[in-house]
Image (cartoon, grey):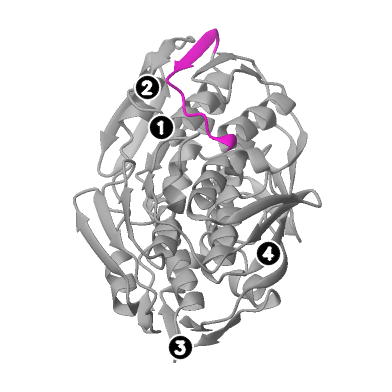
């Protein structure tokens, strides 16, 4: 077991390069199962979730090789359509192999997924989409089993714009005869990246990034090379790191358009965000203004940035309000922030924050991926020493974050705990 040791009080300054998007690469890896040849993916981050998905693909029969940030997946030898619970429960995105397997092999058995305990991510919308196309779905003993009965493209209306359901239905529909239309589809940049990847393999998909996606089913998907988009949540986390330490960071390998909700909120409180050398420069100020944040599906403020923004607002004089609309259990970082000096009151999905600049380091535990990022940010701000445990959550989504922070002036180190 490892821990992070953070000594706060330093303004971060320098250059950081953002890794490829975790939330984009995982569905793309799942979609690689649909390829009858070799898939070459570039810009793949070194993350635990990537390792787990690679293991899942290997169990299903794919050959997965990695060299640096290049991942090569050969799906020609896939011979198994069942993903066991021992793998599924280690990662939320494991359910995405369902759509890929149904699309290519017209059958699948996948255990319900695990991952961070931030709230329920029910499969009902995924199942609704599969059933609308003529796949029979049964649920038994923690498994979802699906098989083609009388399949044809169909129009599906999602009750909410679920990212996972949109991705899963897109994959299954790509190799289902006829035309499928997903209405009220999720609009995240990762959906667009999945469309681009599938289309390069030979799929016929239009509309990703809008609320209606049209998919014309094809018989075969072939070899492709693809570079994953930058991770907008990692970029947002470093933007908040610059702001909370009152630093000055140049962030490279970003798509500015993907970061507009975060840029807007940082601007509201007084952080300066500037285009800079093909990336962005984030300059902190001594004094900020409080503001209110409400998480929403893209292009609204991302739920994956809620914990980080709450940490920043907790250091700003005045009262701010955060409303979490996506997940019902995403305030588990609040008790840990309170240990360090935050004044936060939670009422249901609403958090009321009274800014307090008197923070002290403490021993804290990451309850989930983004909570872990929030605690690192808190440690960078607080006086004294902060020890952060349960790093397995952070390792799921941030590539060597302690090294990147150290390179821009943070006093941070990772060490083993006996």
How far is mark 3 from mark 4, CA to CA?
A: 23 Å
Label of residue 158 in the image = 2
Residue 203 at x, y = what percent? 66, 21
Tell whether label 1 touches label 3 (CB within 8 Å).
Answer: no
Quarter-wise, where is residue 55 in the image? bottom right
Question: Which numbered disc flags the more N-terminal residue, 1 or 4?
Answer: 1
User: Which type of secondary structure does the marked residue at label 2 adopt?
Assistant: loop
Q: How many angstroms separate mark 1 from mark 2 (CA)?
A: 7 Å
Residue interval drawn in magenta: 177-189
**Disc 2 crowd, CA 10 A, few/some/many (<14, 14-19, 20+):** some
Q: Can residue 83 be seen by looking at this rendering?
A: no
- Closest to the camera, between mark 3 and mark 4, is 4
SS of the residue at dot 1?
A: loop
Q: Which residue is drawn at the image coordinates 44% and 63% (left, top)?
A: 312
Q: Does label 2 or label 3 sit earlier along the sequence?
A: 2
Q: CA distance from mark 1 to mark 4?
A: 33 Å
Q: Nearer the viewer, mark 3 or mark 1?
A: 3
> In this view of the protein, can residue 271 be seen by the observer?
yes
The answer to whether mark 1 and mark 4 are in CB contact below 8 A is no
The spot of residue 269 in percent (x, y) is 48, 54
The mark found on residue 162 in the picture is 1
300 relative to 68 in the view: left or right: left
Q: Residue at x 74, y 57 (%)?
A: 69
Q: Earlier in the sequence, mark 3 or mark 1?
A: 1
């Amino acid at each position: 077991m490892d821990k992070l040791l953070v000594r706060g009080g330093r303004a971060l300054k320098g250059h950081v390069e953002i890794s490829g998007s975790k939330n984009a690469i995982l569905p793309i890896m799942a979609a690689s199962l649909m390829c009858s040849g070799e898939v070459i993916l570039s810009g793949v981050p070194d993350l635990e979730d990537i390792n787990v998905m690679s293991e899942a693909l290997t169990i299903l029969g794919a050959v997965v090789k990695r060299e640096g940030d290049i991942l090569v997946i050969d799906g020609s030898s896939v011979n198994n359509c069942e993903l066991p619970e021992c793998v599924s429960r280690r990662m939320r995105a494991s359910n995405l192999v369902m759509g890929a397997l149904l699309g290519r092999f017209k059958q699948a058995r996948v255990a319900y997924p695990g991952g961070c305990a931030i709230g329920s991510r029910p499969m009902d919308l995924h199942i609704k989409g599969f059933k609308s196309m003529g796949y029979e779905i049964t649920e038994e003993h923690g498994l979802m089993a699906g098989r083609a009965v009388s399949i044809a493209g169909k129009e599906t209306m999602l009750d909410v714009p679920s990212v996972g359901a949109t991705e899963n239905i897109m994959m299954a529909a790509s190799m289902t005869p006829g035309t499928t239309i997903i209405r009220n589809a999720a609009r995240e940049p990762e959906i667009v990246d999945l469309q681009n990847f599938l289309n390069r393999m030979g799929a016929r998909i239009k509309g990703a990034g809008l609320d209606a996606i049209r998919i014309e089913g094809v018989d075969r998907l072939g070899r492709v090379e693809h570079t994953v988009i930058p991770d907008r949540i990692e970029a947002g986390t470093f933007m908040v790191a610059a702001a909370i330490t009152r630093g000055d960071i140049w962030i490279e390998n970003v798509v500015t358009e993907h970061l507009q909700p975060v840029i807007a909120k940082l601007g509201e409180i007084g952080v300066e965000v500037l285009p800079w050398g093909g990336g962005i420069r984030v300059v902190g100020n001594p004094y900020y203004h409080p503001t209110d944040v409400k998480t929403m599906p893209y292009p609204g403020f991302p739920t994956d940035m809620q914990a980080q923004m709450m940490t920043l607002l907790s250091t700003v004089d005045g009262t701010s309000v955060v409303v979490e609309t996506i997940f019902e259990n995403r305030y588990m970082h609040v008790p840990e922030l309170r240990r360090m000096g935050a004044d936060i009151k939670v009422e249901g999905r609403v958090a009321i924050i009274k800014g307090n600049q008197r923070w002290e380091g403490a021993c804290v535990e990451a309850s989930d991926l983004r909570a872990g990022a929030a605690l690192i940010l808190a440690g960078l701000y607080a006086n004294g020493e902060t020890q952060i445990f349960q790093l397995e959550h952070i390792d799921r989504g941030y590539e060597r974050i302690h090294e990147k922070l150290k390179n821009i002036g943070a006093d941070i180190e990772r060490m083993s705990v006996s």
